[in-house]
Amino acid sequence: MSDAPLMPKATAVWLVENTSLTFDQIAEFCKLHPLEVKGIADGEVATGIKGYDPISTGQLSREEIAKAEGDSDYRLHLSVSKVRTPEFKKPRGARYTPLSRRQDRPNAVLWLLRNHGELKDAQIMRLVGTTKHTLQAIRERTHWNSANLQPMDPVTLGLCSQIDLDFEVNRAAKDRPKVEEPGGQTLVSAEITTAKPVQPAPSSQLEVFGAPKPKPVEERIDVNAVFGKPKEPRVEDKQPPVEDEESSVEDKQPHVEE
């Protein structure tokens, strides 16, 4: 048996007083030590404990007890209840804060208000374990100790875990509407970047029917004309130098010695 009955010692007291089961059988069923069951029978253990009837509570049947009384090697089996009771879930209340950490809660609230303004009041109260009145007083600077408050990380103070803080921050970020910054740089979609370039429209009918385009005429340059020797001028181009009329007249007159 892996499950023990309800109130094992009180059940053992009832089985010792009302049945002829052995100590080992009772100890095996109630998950106790055989010497402890022997002490209950001797009145040394569980004095003043009233016996708890397992038959009335549906944990044992009379047939199961009678079968175990007839065979000392038989082990009792806990009866399975046919009625399933819903599991009781304790409602989640305010977070408990140790006395040594309660004086640090205003500092943690101030840190959250400065660094995570997107958090709602209920989220801050759930993280730190503060009240609405204290939170409002710290925000409006009307707290009695606002002059001495210093923002401190609640995770460092031990008021909440980093996982809880990240969860509340991400939750507040999802609820906050997205604001697009005007004029900001944005990434171009893959459809635009991978699209094929658009070919220009044909300028003539020859391009429509696939006619070959005329090749541009390359201007040939004579290498000899550029790097060769300069040509001699023609005979016609050679003209005698023109002398001045005055100088020619003086040369024609005879030279007279004085």
Image (cartoon, rainbow, N blue to C red):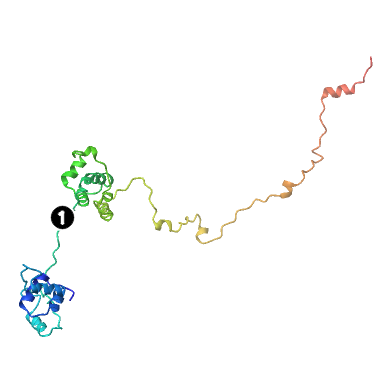
Q: In terms of depth relative to the viewer, which is nearer, 96 or 66?
A: 66
Q: Mark 1 belongs to which amino acid?
A: Gly
Residue 45 in the image, given as x and y percentages of width and height: 10, 69
User: Above or below — where is 48 with respect to 239?
Assistant: below
Mark 1, other Cα within 10 Å: few <14 / some 14–19 / many ≥20: few
Label 1: element kind:
loop
* Residue furthest to the right: 257
Q: Nearer the viewer, residue 244 or 105?
A: 105
In the orientation shown, which residue stands out farthest toward the top?
258
Determine which quarter of the picture holds residue 252: top right
Q: Is residue 107 at least partly visible in the picture? A: yes
Residue 7 located left or right of residue 206: left
| 231 on left or right of 97 | right
Q: Position of residue 155 (x, y in %)?
A: 27, 51
Q: Residue 201 at x, y = what percent?
A: 47, 55
Which residue is rendered at x = 5% and y = 76% of the image? 17
Q: Is residue 237 above or below residue 48?
A: above
Decide: is 50 above or below 191.
below
Quadrant the C terminus occupies? top right
Q: Which residue is mark 1?
A: 93
**Which residue is drawn at the image coordinates 74% and 49% (left, top)?**
224
| Residue sitting at x 17%, y 44% | 134
